[in-house]
Amino acid sequence: MLIDSKYSTRELLTWFGHILWSVRLQSFINMMSGVVRVALDFAFIWATKQAIDIATHSSQPVASDQLSTFSFHLTTLSEAGILLVVIMLLQMSLGYAGRWIAALLGVEAQNRMQRRLFEHLLRSEWRGREVRHSGDVLNRLVSDNTTVVSVMTDTLPQALAVTVRLIAAFFFLYSMDAMLAVGVTLILPIFILLSRLYINRMRALTREVRRTDSQIQSTLQEGIQHRLVLKTLERMPTMADVLAKQQANLRMLVRRRTVFSSTSNLVLNMGFGSAYLLTFLWSVYRLSDDTITFGMMTAFIQLCGQIQGPFRELTRFIPTIIGSFTAAERLIELEEVPEEADGQPLRFTSEAGIRVTDVSYAYDANSRLVLEHLNIDFAPGTSTAVLGETGAGKTTLIRLILALLHPDSGHVEIYDAGHSMEVSARTRCNLVYVPQGNSLFSGTVRWNLLMGKPDATDEELHQALQVACADFIQQLPQGLDTYVGEGGAGLSEGQAQRIAIARALLRQGNILLLDEATSALDQQTEHRLIDNLLQHNDRLAVKPTLIFITHRPAVVDKCTQVITLKKHGIH
């Protein structure tokens, strides 16, 4: 079943207008290049006609239905030859320069729009349970972005140039033979009538093709990302079958779209072919009647191509334009994700704590409450171990403290001795977070650490690594410049965790949140790490508040406060 669009054509055109304004330079240059190319093409047709008439010693026939196209004429073949060479050189030069400029400006426009969408997604609210697969989002940021920008900077200027070509060719031909010009363009009403049904049907098919294409990319991404799991479960054929079914569905949709498009093009090409035949027979008739020259007959046939050519171009543009409407819908959906409230960071300069007051939260209206009337005080400068069974809401609590989620009721506040305020994106500057699992980026160890503090010195980097028990980095051949692959490839999970903790320490916030951050460490290393963190805190002028989400006894024994979350409450 094909999916209906939730955006009206007017809404999409308004959105395209904003995009067009942002790429106006590229669009204008491409449009002017197309218009100049049209002018050179007609100049070439005129020069060709002049050369043929000179070569055949034909004179311009005088008839009641003819007008002189130009007020001057070439007199020698050498003049005509030189003019034709000049026009050809200009055409080639314009084509070369146009392709070069269009490629550079087009890439810049794509990069700018992709960067804008990427930054919007990074700034957008985190919803806990993402409605779109990351593979689908990537497909939109790459393929759909390219489609939309290409239409704005290339297809639309070409369409305008094609329209100029159509109008100019009609009047050029009309000045020489009004009846022929009108007859050749009678195909236009038929084209308009056919295009309405064609556009609506193609838009629906293209939308479904893009959706299926996103599903395939998501499957490929997950299969590559979790190939170790697939190997150990011996389910590689299962994943391959899922991909095969999705590809079969895509193949069926593309086949349907191609059959429909080919049938529509066949009908239109029959009309175009009829116009060429009409032009040829009419020209032969008038040539035999001595009312036109052979040069004019050649011009008629070329001008017929200049009139019919735009219609052919429009049939080529239509699938691209329809695809851009589908791509626009998918990009608008990304833009509609609201951004977090922006503003100046609100930094606490003294010891700060977190107070959770009567907080309840559910991920959506149909889900159970993950937290219900929760009350906790993480006092400034204390260390707290948060325990709890799976599903008790430990990670949700961390997300509420980070203001990634907002409570359905109650309050989460950050406070010090003098004042307090509700947590928000603006108070996040006071928090340092180490999530579960491997959170390293592909790149060098240095690059990962500098994400915590971009201007950190090597001495500060080594100090953070030492506190995090990650001084093993110094023993590696390339030290801080050791490359870490995707998913921490090249390091053990425990080593990756310690580097992530060192990165967090470089941020130097008032409140340190560690979500199962020592789960991959052996007992001895874990004891040493916790001791280092506590001793490091004692040496600081402002002692950070530590919050550990953990199941490990080594952490619990060293904390000043232990809280056990239960489903619908605490113990």
Image (spheres, rainbow, N blue to C red):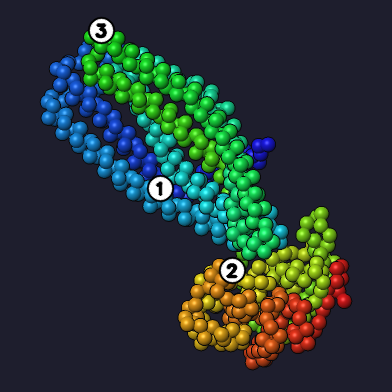
Work out how far the residue at label 1 is from the one at label 3, CA to CA, in angstroms.
50 Å
Q: Is residue 323 above or below residue 502?
A: above
The answer to the question of whether label 2 and label 3 lie on touching residues, with beta carbons closer than 8 A, is no
Which of the two labelled residues, at mark 1 and mark 3, occupies the earlier sequence position? 1
Q: Amino acid at mark 3?
A: Asp
Task: Name the mark nearer the viewer: 1 or 3.
Answer: 3
The image quarter in which residue 91 lies: top left
Name the residue nearer the viewer: 72 or 204: 204
Q: Residue at x 23, y 17 (%)?
A: 294
Q: Residue at x 32, y 33 (%)?
A: 38
Instruction: Answer few, some or many: residues within 10 Å of disc 2's Cα (few below 14, many 20 plus, some between 14 and 19).
Output: some
Name the residue nearer the viewer: 345 or 174: 174
> Which quarter of the figure is the C terminus placed in?
bottom right
According to the picture, the residue beneath numbered tag 3 turns out to be 289
The answer to the question of whether label 1 and label 2 lie on touching residues, with beta carbons closer than 8 A, is no
Q: Is residue 76 above or below residue 120?
A: above
The circle drawn on residue 487 is: 2
Name the residue nearer the viewer: 232 or 55: 232
Task: Name the mark nearer the viewer: 2 or 3.
Answer: 2
According to the picture, the residue beneath numbered tag 1 turns out to be 26
Q: Residue at x 62, y 58 (%)?
A: 222
The answer to the question of whether label 1 and label 3 lie on touching residues, with beta carbons closer than 8 A, is no
Q: Secondary structure at mark 2?
A: helix
Q: Amino acid at mark 2?
A: Gly
The image quarter in which residue 34 lies: top left
Q: Secondary structure at mark 1?
A: helix
- Can residue 332 be seen in this snapshot? no
Q: Amino acid at mark 1?
A: Gln
Q: Secondary structure at mark 3?
A: loop
- Can residue 151 be seen in this snapshot? yes
Q: Count up the numbered dots.
A: 3
Residue lying farthest to the top in this orientation:
289
